[in-house]
Image (cartoon, grey):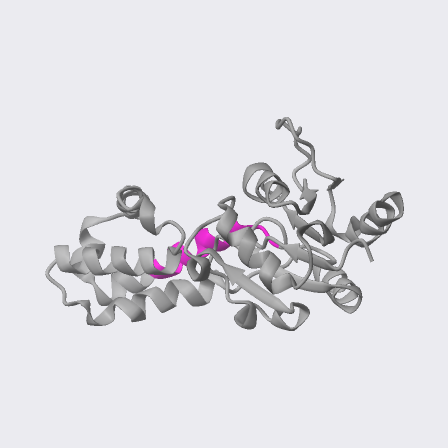
Amino acid sequence: MPIQCVTFDLDDTLWAIYPVIDRAEAKFLKWVEEHLPRIAAKFTAQTLSSHRHQYFKQYPELHHDLSRLRKNWIAQLMTDHGYTEDKVDDGFNVFWRERNTLELFDDVENVLSLLNKRFRTGAVTNGNADLHQIGIHHYFDFYLTSAQVGNSKPHPAIFDATVSHAQCRPDQILHVGDDPKRDVLGARSAGMRTVWANLKDEEWQENISPDVTITDIADLPDAIDRFITSL
């Protein structure tokens, strides 16, 4: 079989991530208002977000591990305002639970169920989604995060790890993702086949094109069939 494994990016490929993060940040701010009043008195939602962005920029070496980076930020925020760090995990978990409360794009579960019956399937992400909490872990044979690997897409290390978990040759893997550089070009550089999930109907700007382009996840199974037929 020319394709033996299909791998998926998660954020903005299987669900829209920015509304989820906005809700999670709002829930975290409410928790801060209840439990850390000195911090709440100093920050609005906007200035707290700016503070977090500035903190994250200082530690590019941790961008592959967003959970660790966020916990470090919360700890620093507490220390700077005279709190001990004993509530770091509590604050993180408030954000974390909401981050994993999300709405999948239409037909995602149908597509994952169908493809998992035909191919080995994997999730490969730079984010920190919890597939068990979301309720879709059973559709995947393996799940790789940049935090586990120590590098983010498009770094070759995360795609090398993908090949290892896929248990087949790179050219027998079809990677599906929304990001032209991190997903399509990253996977292509590793020797994989690629699907650009162009769900926002944008123009392709890179020199190397994806093998397949879709504008709706529901179209993925048929698009894969056409691609396999063309090989």
The residue positioned farthest toward the right in the image shown: 229
| Magenta-drawn stretch contains 24 | yes
Q: Locate the C terminus by quadrant.
A: top right
In-front residue for pair 157/76: 157
Q: Main secondary structure of the magenta part?
A: helix
Rendering coords of residue 94 (x, y %)? 37, 67
In-front residue for pair 17/147: 147
In-front residue for pair 118/190: 190
| Left or right of residue 212: residue 138 | left
The answer to whether one can see residue 18 in this image is no
| Left or right of residue 226: residue 12 | left
Q: Locate the N terminus by quadrant.
A: bottom right
Q: Residue at x 58, y 55 (%)?
A: 10
Indicate the quadrant where residue 202 lies: top right
Rendering coords of residue 195 (x, y %)? 70, 44
| Magenta stretch in the rendered image | 15-28
Q: How many marks?
A: 0
Rendering coords of residue 58 (x, y %)? 26, 43
Q: Is residue 22 above or below residue 101?
A: above
Q: Residue at x 58, y 41 (%)?
A: 179
| Left or right of residue 136: residue 55 | left
Q: Is residue 18 above or below residue 181?
A: below
Indicate the quadrant where residue 204 lies: top right
Rendering coords of residue 161 (x, y %)? 54, 58
Q: Residue at x 14, y 64 (%)?
A: 83
The residue positioned farthest toward the front in the image shown: 169
The answer to whether one can see residue 44 in this image is yes
Q: Residue at x 26, y 58 (%)?
A: 72
| Magenta-drawn stretch contains 212 | no
